[in-house]
Amino acid sequence: MSDKIFDIGIIGYGPVGATLSGLLSSLGLSVVVIDKNKGVSPTARAINTDSEQLRTFNFLNITTEVIANSRKLKKVHFTDSEFNPYSTIDIPEKDKLGWPPTLLFYQPELETIIRSNNLNYKNLKILENAEAVNIQNTNPVQIDIKNNRKDSTVYCKYLVGCDGANSFVRKYIKAKLIDFGFDQDWIVIDAHTTKQIDISKDEAKQICDPNRLKTYVPGRRNHKRFEFKLLKGETKKDFSNKKIWELLSPWINKNNSKIERAVVYKFHACIADKWRDKNIFIAGDAAHQMPPFLGAGMGTGIRDAFNLAWKIYLIIKGMAEENLLETYQQEREPHANWTIQQAKLIGQMMEQFSYREKGEKYVPSSKGYGEVFPHLTKGYYGDPSDGLIATPFCRFDLDHSGKDSDEYFGWNFGLISKKKLPKEINLILKKMNIKVLSVNDNKLKNYFKEANYLLIRPDKYLFSRSKTNSDLKKALSELENQFSLIT
Ligand SMILES: Cc1cc2nc3c(=O)[nH]c(=O)nc-3n(C[C@H](O)[C@H](O)[C@H](O)COP(=O)(O)OP(=O)(O)OC[C@H]3O[C@@H](n4cnc5c(N)ncnc54)[C@H](O)[C@@H]3O)c2cc1C
């Protein structure tokens, strides 16, 4: 066995594996990431991100760069075949996390930003052209790697499979995919305008044309994304160059744009029934896949990475029991499940509008869950009945330091206090390494309704709200029971 046992091994250096590598490395853990390919994937699959991902990226100090290379979306329209809106979603400039709720990026560029930052971590080993061909769930976990020059083996305490839709790791842990019964073929076209043209720059359109469903999304800078549903019996062969330009003709033409790629994808919806086997986990597309109507596939994977990173860190540092890792699937699966249902529902809403134009009726089979991402429904937090606990806590600027609240708390548990804290509680907080912020900002009015103290998890989910000192002591002792924060 080689001498080196990495804290974490990650198979797959796509956006999810790259983000997880960065997060764990930034926490000082030793990480090895393995990818069978070299360099970022050239295909611009994902195009849309959200504020929770921007929060995660800010832990890698790359959010400013991501925003600078993205486009803010202002509206999404569901329209008839003539582009007249049936329904419009207005997107605010910022949400409670203080970031744009929707942002359009170019995936190869985003992955390059994440990977460039990862080069700063000396404790991160990146192995490319390295295919994981065999794993053993031993202690440590063994990964056998095939490389065209030399085969090798690496060892790690925990392994995370971020190896995409055909995940080798998912198959190894014998997880089954639960199918949501949504399979549609769409042709996805990425184009770049070469001249200034009159084309909607900050409004996306879901065109519910009864003759063919279509999507237009204005990407960052001159990138434009078009998607067209294949009709019954159509295959990729039916899409000649001429046909593709015909489809694009309401927006762009050969004189003002060039096509980067036109690929037929099978949009699919499924989720793994098992996300962990002892010291092996799966995350990202390895654990779930969804149609891109909500633009949330990659985002769901980035949420997995954020959820897993701090838990693995606390366990490796001896500050939490192994059973904390059970909360990974408990917390993430219902959320991913909901997101898949929503993505499927948006596809079905497009069908529904298109049937309306034909004068026919169509009833979506997918459940509607409202527009707001759901709370954690199972896992580790206090009583969520107030609708605030177990949801992402807001982010706000701190007047005195120039930092924002996320930067102030970093990866620590945090306490926000409206009242002066008694000495004995201050002492406990210090021993537990909980960062304290005394603030009574108007932005926190809702949170401080019938509460004086707010406990925040490292992933910035609200853990508890307490009114009295004794309530707070109880919440702290619950926290200490679960985590051994006292060092
Ligand atoms: C048309 C389209 C539009 C989309 N739009 C959006 C969107 O707007 N927003 C959004 O959030 N998501 C979107 N998605 C989904 C998004 O692209 C994926 O969810 C995301 O890329 C998945 O990232 P990942 O890191 O989990 O997997 P991948 O990007 O698939 O990366 C997996 C990596 O694992 C490597 N690998 C696999 N097996 C091995 C092995 N045995 N050994 C070593 N390496 C291995 C691969 O080489 C690859 O680099 C879209 C998808 C499509 C197809």
Image (cartoon, rainbow, N blue to C red):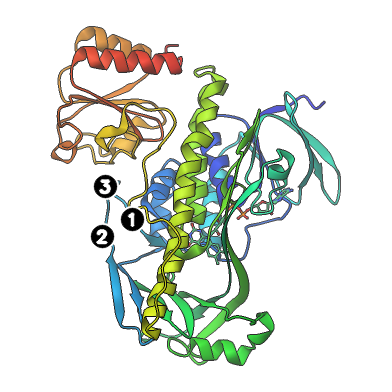
Marks 2/3: CA–CA distance: 10 Å
Examine the rendering and report whether any part of residue 294 can be seen: no
Q: Is residue 68 above or below residue 326?
A: below
Q: Provide residue 240's location: percent of width, then percent of height.
A: 64, 88
Name the image quarter holding residue 396: top left
Image point 39% across, 47% down: which residue? 52
Residue toward you, 197 or 239? 239
Q: Residue furthest top?
A: 424
Image point 28% across, 48% down: which residue? 98
Q: Earlier in the sequence, mark 1 or mark 3?
A: 3
Residue toward you, 433 or 342? 342
Quickly name the residue at label 2: 92
Mark 2 and 1 residues: CB-CB less than 8 Å, in contact?
yes
Q: Quadrant of the N terminus?
A: top right
Q: Provide residue 188's location: percent of width, then percent of height.
A: 56, 74
- Judged from the image, the secondary structure of the residue bearing numbered disc 3 is loop
Q: What amino acid is at disc 3?
A: Lys
Q: Is residue 320 above or below residue 285?
A: above
Mark 1 and 3 residues: CB-CB less than 8 Å, in contact?
no
Q: Is residue 418 above or below residue 442?
A: above
Marks 2/1: CA–CA distance: 7 Å
Q: Provide residue 185's location: percent of width, then percent of height.
A: 60, 72
Q: In which quadrant of this rendering is ligand 1 seen?
A: bottom right
Quickly name the residue at label 3: 96
Examine the rendering and report whether any part of residue 287 can be seen: yes
Q: Say left or right for 481 vs 402.
A: right
**Alpha-carbon neighbours of circle 1 within 10 Å: few (<14), some, or many (≥20)?**
many
**Alpha-carbon neighbours of circle 3 within 10 Å: few (<14), some, or many (≥20)?**
some
Quickly name the residue at label 1: 101
